[in-house]
Amino acid sequence: MPVIDPDSAPLRTGTIYPAPMAALVAGRSSRKLGEAAGLTQYGVNMIILQPGAAASARHWHEREDEFLIVTQGEMLLVDEDGEHPMRSGDCAAFPAGQANGHHMVNHSDSEARFLVVGTSIDGEVAHYPDHGLKVVLGQGGPRFFHEDGRPFSDGGG
């Protein structure tokens, strides 16, 4: 059936981030709407941010496009050009390969939500410029590296 009940879609509350980055996304959860619909070529996720939460560390993708629309509340889009207030109905797009590290942050006193749609490519690489890290995403799970290619470990490796 093509109709999806967002509240019954899988809820994700954890993070793939290693310990130094995980605290950034405390208070973030997401509903995997695309997964609930059986989509495999792109992801569709409702991101839910409690006050003070960030959706992710600032990042950019080598081969995946991202599009988002704010559906509830107010938040800031933080990218290479600064902070941009976003409200319900506002949209942003991040083409693949453009090194514009970005993330959404909820500095309001209320829950905020946005819908994000992005391509899903096995072996995708995302870069985290504020942390000097990158992640390779694939079927074997996420693997973090320093930007120079050395494997990253939570122990400071």
Image: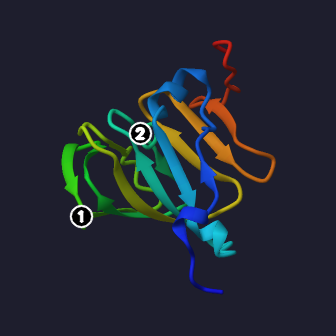
Q: Secondary structure at mark 2?
A: loop
Identified by mark 1, the residue type is Asp
Give the quarter of the figure containing the C terminus.
top right
Q: Is residue 138 visible?
A: yes
Q: Quadrant of residue 80?
A: top left
Picture residue at 26% right of the left edge, 53% below the top? 73
Q: In the visual, does 121 lie left or right of 23?
A: right
Around disc 2, counting alpha carbons within 10 Å, would you say few (fewer than 14), some (14 to 19), or many (20 or more)? Answer: many
Q: Position of residue 127 (x, y in %)?
A: 51, 41
Going by the numbered disc 2, the residue's amino acid type is Arg
**Horizontal and vertical percent position of residue 146:** 60, 27
Q: CA distance from mark 2 to mark 1?
A: 19 Å
Q: Nearer the viewer, residue 117 or 32?
A: 32
User: Which is in the foreground here, disc 2 or disc 1?
Assistant: 1
* Disc assigned to residue 58: 2
Q: Position of residue 7 (x, y in %)?
A: 54, 63
- 48 vs 70, left or right, is right
Q: Is residue 6 above or below residue 148?
A: below
Residue 122 in percent (x, y) is at 71, 59
Residue at the spot 58% in from the left edge and 42% down from the top edge: 13
Please give left or right for residue 80 compared with residue 40 in the image.
left
Residue beneath the point at 33% across and 46% down: 111
Q: 98 or 8, which is in the foreground?
A: 8
The residue to which callout 1 is attached is: 90
First in sequence: mark 2 or mark 1?
2
